[in-house]
Image (tube, helix red, strand yellow):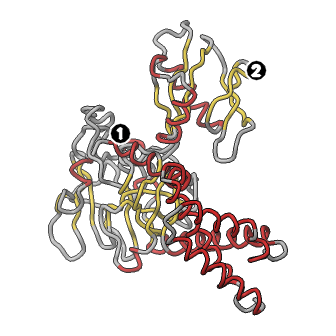
């Protein structure tokens, strides 16, 4: 199904959730609308009687029963006028039929807050943990925060279109002129929670307020300057800053099965390499090697010799559907590459005669964007206790990666993507 159709269906579903009751009430017949009100009053009355059953006086309990009987009888009425009269009488006398307790509003909100937080923390601890991709190390399978260059004609002018593009694709547009020569800085600017803005400082003055953290703003402003063909020409910063993919991480599967090669895995960086400056406590990579494996890279492909076997074999589609995409050299995929680094890493000296061998509690992680990924080639292996869970669902933005993770084929719009480093 085309992505646009999914977005339309998603929008219609949200509208129905938010305004479906109002639409049904106004679009249905008068009698049907009154019956909806009668059913809602019956449900509210039954809930009140259930919650307060140990505190109701006999007289009040009898009145509630009489009111419920009248509402039930009104549901069978064939004329809307008689049914509407019963409904209006009940609504006008509601405070005497079911008097609210003291501080009812505060208690109700407190109950909702306590239940919501309890469910959220329980789900986060036991089932699904929300996670945001911070960097581009897993591109193009998953995207971190990134800036997409656009032409001025591609920037929408309608505020509604900009709002919808943010809600659907997390896009925040930028279109400003930059001077031909400048020193660039950025400082935090007042902004709403979770939607950071920064002041772009050019030659000591505030030139614009742009979306993103200061580091992100500096990165894409300097990238725009690097794309300029002439250093003397005026520069135009035009494009969209897009938030990283937002995931739900399955925390339960590793309790019932062992991690598998090819799993997109979230893990903690605690005690992996104390002298390495990790950018955060949680990382996400593709699990490439299991305990006891031997592995090496050749011709942009990964070869594995599992524990107990005598020969290396190519990690291909039989291990995970992701590997043919990784080796395709198209749509942003460039395969795996070597890096010159210290021992135990997949450096340029690592071959079938001298592979990396993993210990009994060691897991090897690789980023899909191998040329721009700091992974086990750089900081070493990950112990079992650090594994958090498997990336399950990308719930926002509504891009081609939306839905179950690791399912999208290489983007044909990008085309061939040959390696840029050996």
Q: Which residue is mark 2?
A: 204
- Against 136, residue 319 (above or below) is below
- The residue nearer to you, when weighing 336 against 186, is 186
Mark 1 or mark 2, which is nearer to you? 1
| SS at mark 2 in the image | loop
- Against 333, residue 46 (above or below) is below
x and y percentages locating residue 189 in the rendered image: 73, 35
- Against 329, residue 382 (above or below) is below
x and y percentages locating residue 4 in the rendered image: 35, 39
Q: How many marks?
A: 2
Q: Identify the residue at image location x=65%, y=77%.
A: 45
Q: Identify the residue at image location x=33%, y=54%.
A: 406
Q: Identify the residue at image location x=58%, y=55%.
A: 280
Q: Which residue is mark 1?
A: 4
- The residue nearer to you, when weighing 337 against 225, is 225
Q: Identify the residue at image location x=32%, y=65%.
A: 289
- Against 337, residue 383 (above or below) is below
x and y percentages locating residue 286 in the rendered image: 36, 58
Between discs 1 and 2, the one toward the N terminus: 1
| SS at mark 1 in the image | helix
């Amino acid at each position: 199904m085309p992505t646009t159709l999914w977005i339309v269906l998603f929008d219609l579903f949200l509208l129905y959730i938010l305004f479906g009751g109002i639409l049904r009430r106004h679009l249905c017949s008068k009698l049907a609308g009154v019956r909806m009100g009668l059913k809602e009053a019956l449900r509210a009355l039954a809930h009140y009687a259930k919650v307060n059953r140990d505190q109701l006086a006999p007289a009040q309990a009898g009145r509630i029963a009489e009111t419920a009987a009248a509402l039930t009888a009104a549901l069978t009425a064939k004329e809307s006028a008689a049914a509407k009269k019963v409904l209006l009488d009940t609504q006008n006398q509601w405070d005497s039929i079911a008097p609210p307790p003291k501080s009812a509003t505060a208690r109700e909100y407190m109950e909702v807050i306590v239940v919501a937080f309890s469910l959220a923390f329980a789900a986060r601890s036991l089932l699904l943990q929300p996670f945001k991709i911070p960097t581009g190390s897993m591109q193009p399978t998953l995207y971190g925060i990134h800036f997409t260059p656009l032409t001025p004609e591609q920037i929408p002018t309608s505020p509604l279109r900009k709002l919808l593009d943010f809600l659907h694709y997390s896009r925040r547009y930028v279109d400003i002129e930059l001077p031909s020569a400048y020193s660039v800085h950025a400082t935090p600017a007042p902004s709403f929670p979770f939607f950071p803005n920064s002041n772009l400082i050019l030659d000591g003055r505030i030139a614009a307020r742009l979306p993103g953290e200061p580091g992100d703003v500096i990165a894409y402003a300097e990238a725009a300057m690097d794309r300029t063909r002439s250093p003397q020409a005026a520069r135009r910063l035009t494009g969209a800053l897009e938030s990283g993919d937002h995931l739900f991480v399955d925390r339960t599967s590793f309790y019932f099965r062992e991690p598998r090669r090819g799993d997109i895995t979230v893990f903690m960086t605690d005690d992996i390499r104390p002298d390495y400056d990790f950018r955060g406590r949680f990382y996400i990579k593709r699990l490439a090697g299991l305990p006891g494996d031997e592995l090496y890279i050749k011709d942009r492909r990964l070869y594995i010799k599992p524990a107990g076997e005598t020969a290396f074999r190519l990690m291909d589609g039989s291990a995970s559907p992701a590997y043919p995409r990784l080796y395709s050299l198209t749509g942003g995929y460039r395969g795996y590459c070597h890096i010159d680094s210290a021992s135990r890493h997949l450096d340029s000296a690592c071959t079938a005669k001298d592979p990396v061998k993993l210990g009994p509690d060691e897991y090897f992680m690789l980023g899909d964007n191998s040329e721009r990924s700091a992974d086990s080639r750089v900081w070493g292996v990950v112990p079992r206790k650090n594994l958090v869970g498997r990336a399950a669902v990308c719930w926002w933005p509504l891009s081609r990666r939306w839905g179950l993770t690791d399912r999208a084929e290489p983007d044909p719009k990008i085309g061939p993507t040959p390696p840029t480093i050996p």
